[in-house]
Amino acid sequence: MKVIFSTEQLRHKPGKVLSSGALVDGLEVPGRATTLLQAAIATGLTQEVPHNFGMEPIAAVHTARYLSFLENIHTRWMRIPGASTDVRPNVHPHAIDCVYPASAVGQVGFHVFDGAAPITADTWDSARWSAFAAVHAAQEVLRGASSCYALARPPGHHATAELAGGFCYLNNSAIAAMQLRSAHERVAILDVDVHHGNGTQSIFYERGDVLTVSLHADPVRFYPFFWGAADEQGKRDGLGFNLNLPLTRGTADDEYLLALDEALAKIDAFDPGAIVIALGLDAFAGDPFAGLGLTTAGFGRVAKRIEALQRPTVLVQEGGYPCAQLGDNLAAFLAPFHSNFRSS
Ligand SMILES: [Zn+2]
């Protein structure tokens, strides 16, 4: 089994992020990726550097004006007298049906929905290579590999078609799913990150060809707050193709696995040609976000049940933040896929 990763993805090093109104050091640091890469290699995976796939696979998910914004905003921001080093919004439209602003400050408010997605001079490049890792992993699976792991950093599941937020800029899991759609009628995305995958949900909310399922800490008192409730089930063609399973804070292995079984039953009934796992490891009891109570062994049990579906699977890294067991948690999750790996 392969791990797909480029060192270009380490260049994005944001300074402070806004948390409860305070500027603090962000948890989404390059060291996460280094730890995860070491763990993947120690598990026996082979590293491959993704190809540069250009804009096409990314534009299958994101709007042209958003991609142009991401590419150019840091340069434009630096022309503003007195502006901060990292791009961060200080104004937001209350609703999305407002005019599209021409100014850099206005566009940052429009496209960045919170203070946890600062844009540096290197963000665009790192985010693109993170997306390329997801594309590359999807293509491995399309070529016949039973599974492939995209070490996508920065992560992506909070990013919508044209909004960045929550450490996310390009939605790598959605981009992988669209690659898989080129060969499969139906694709499912299972998001096990502790935070609801609001971006992924939004991108496929009106579609019946990509099933989105998310297990997460109940957003009533947890980020991303505004999305992730059980009654969000999709719209129009997508009605019935979005399943949210919000969990009580601190939910541990056994109870989590019950919800997972419900998620897997839904996915199996949908009969997807391939699956994307939005692999957040921040549901761990010792993760700094402290939302759920999974153990390292619990991640292994979760992965084993997913693997038992016996469907081609692309694992796309999402959250999972600095703690002593971060690498062990990835190793536990990868092990069932790696041990039953079938190469192309
Ligand atoms: Zn998360």
Image (cartoon, rainbow, N blue to C red):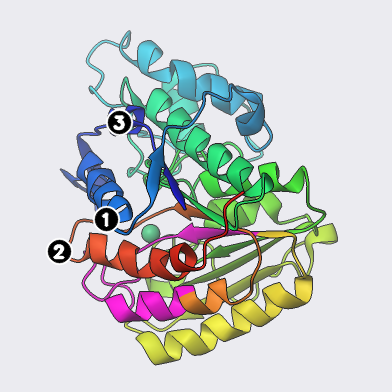
Q: Give me the disc on residue 324.
A: 2
Circle 2: residue type: Ala
Of residues 63 and 140, the one drawn nearer to the viewer in this rendering: 140
User: Is label 3 in a helix, a strand or a loop?
Assistant: loop
The residue depicted at 78 percent of the width and 46 percent of the height is 183
Mark 2 nearby-residue class (10 Å; few <14, some 14–19, many ≥20): few
- Which of the 4 image quadrants contains residue 252? bottom left
Q: What stretch is highlighted in magenta?
A: 275-303
Q: Is residue 290 magenta?
A: yes
In this rendering, is residue 217 above or below 117?
Answer: below
Mark 1 nearby-residue class (10 Å; few <14, some 14–19, many ≥20): few
> What is the distance, in whole Å, between disc 1 and disc 3 at their CAs?
25 Å
Q: Give me the disc on residue 42.
A: 1
> What is the distance, in whole Å, between disc 2 and disc 3 at their CAs?
23 Å
> What is the distance, in whole Å, between disc 1 and disc 2 at their CAs?
16 Å
In this rendering, is residue 223 above or below 34?
Answer: below
Residue 169 placement, left or right of 235: left
Of residues 233 and 43, the one drawn nearer to the viewer in this rendering: 43
Residue 44 placement, left or right of 1: left
Mark 3 nearby-residue class (10 Å; few <14, some 14–19, many ≥20): many
Residue 210 spot, x, y in % from top left:
73, 57
